[in-house]
Amino acid sequence: MFVSHFYQHIDNAKKSLDSGRDEVAENLVSIAYKNLGILNSKTAIELKKQLDKIIKEIKKFRQNKPNIKIGIASDSLSLPRPYYMKDFDHINNPSFAYNYEDTYPELLRKQLSNKYEQEIIVNNFANRSTGINFALYKQNDMHHWYGLDVSIFHFGIVDCWLRTETGMKPQISPEVFEQKFKQFADFKNNLAPAANSIVIGIAPTTAHRLQKVPEQNKLINQYNNILKSNLPDNTLFLDIEALYQTCGDALLHKDGNHLSELGNKIFADELNAMIQKTLKQRISRLKSSKIKSDKLTIGSKIKPIDNPNIFGYIQKPSIKGNILTQQGWAIDKLSKSPATKILIAKRDKTIIGIFSTCISRNDIATKFGKSFLKSGFKIKTSNNNEILNTNDYDIYASDKDGLCGKLIKCK
C-alpha cells in the first residue's frame, strides 16, 4: 500500500459510516491498521490517530444502531424437515419432524431478542444439497453486500456424504475441499478481515448409518480438520464433533445427517453464546496493530509487504533503489530508500541469516557466487555449517526502516 492508499481507505471508511455501513468502515480500518507497519513511524502515528478517531465513531454509531443483522448460509440443515423425506407428500403426508419455528436460525433469533434491545434480524439463506461451492458463491454477499454483523456458514455434509449416486465417494474430494476452503479464507482475510464469522463443523453420523457406511465418520473428521486448520481471521469454529461426544445420536434426525429437534436447540444455544462474545469483542481487537516494524534479528520473523512487485519488474541493474541481479531478479518494495540488508528466511519467514546489502551485479556475484538465484543458490549461515538453497528458503531485502520485500524473479 502507498501512503495515498491509506488516505483513500480512511476517506472511504468515513463515507461508508455516514451511509450506515459500519461493517464496511470497520473492514477498511482493519486493512489500514494491518499495514501500518510498512510506513515510517512519523507517518504511521499520524494515520493511526485518524484511524482511532474512526473507531470511536464506529463505536458511537453502534450504540445507537437500530438492529443487529445475522446471516446464515447453509444447506438443508437449517431448514424444516419431514419425518421421512421419501414418504413426504404435500397432500397425503405433510407432517414435519419440526417446523421452521423450531429450526436453529429461528430459535437463535428469539434468544438474541431476549438479550438485546435492538431488533434482531436473522436471515436464513439456506439452499438444499449445497456445500463448499455455495459458501464460496455467497461469501461476497455475506461479508459485504448484506451488511451483516455476523455471518454464519454451515456446510460440508453434502461434500463428504458417501452415497450410491456418487459411487460411495465424496462429492468433493478432501483435496479439492481444502483448496476451496483456502480460497474462502483468503477472500475474507484480504477483503473483509474484520467481518465477524462463524463456521459450523460437520456432525458425525449415527450408529445406524455407520452399520451401512462404516467409514463415514472418519471422512467427516478429515473434513472438520480441514476447516479447523484453515479458519479465516475473526472466525469462530463451532465444533460439532465435540458436541456429539456429549449428545450422541440424539443430536441428529433419523436420517443420520440432518438435525433433530434437540439438535436445533443445542445449535441455537451454542451460536447464541458465540455471537454475544463476538459482538462484545469486535472493536477492541483492532487496537493491537504495531506502528514500528519489528527489529530484524536472527530468529525473528519477517513481515513482508502485502503487495508483490508493486513497482513492476526491473530488468536492468542500478545502484539506486532496488536490489538487482544479472538474472533479472528484483525486490518488490515500497520504500524509495535503498535496501540495506539481505535476509535469508525459512518458509515460515523466520530469519536465519542477515547480510550487508549488495546493490550491484558484481557485488552480488562476488558475495554470493555466480550461481546466486539462477537455478538455486548456495550460501553458508553465520555458523558456517548449513547450506541453503531456494527450494527451502526465501530471500528478502530490507531498507533502513526495516521494510521488507521478497526477491522475485522477472518475467
Image (cartoon, rainbow, N blue to C red):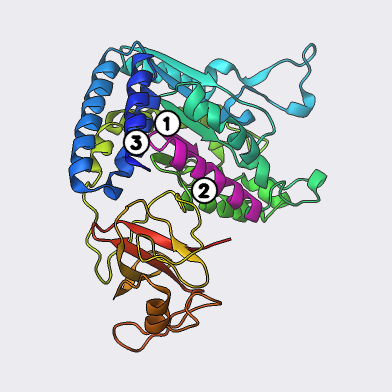
Please tell me how crowded label 3 is: few (under 14), some (14-19), or many (20+) other residues with Cα within 10 Å: few
Residue type at mark 2 is Leu
Q: Name the residue tied to disc 2.
A: 227
Q: Give the residue pinned by disc 3.
A: 4
Among numbered discs 2 and 1, the one appearing first in the sequence: 2
Camera sees residue 78: yes
Mark 1 lies on a secondary structure that is helix
Q: Residues within 10 Å of mark 2 (few under 14, many from 20)?
A: many
Seen from the viewer's position, the closer of residues 260 and 29 is 29
Per the rendering, the mark at residue 246 is: none
Q: Which residues are magenta?
A: 175-200
Residue at horizontal 27 percent and vertical 47 percent from the top: 39
Q: Which amino acid does the dot numbered 1 rest on? A: Leu
The quadrant the N terminus occupies is: top left
Please report whichever mark, 2 or 3, sits nearer to the chain's N-terminal start: 3
Query: What residue is shown at x 73% (from left), y 50% (from top)?
Result: 212
Label 2 residue SS: helix
Q: Is residue 151 left or right of residue 132?
A: left
For residue 271, the mark is 1
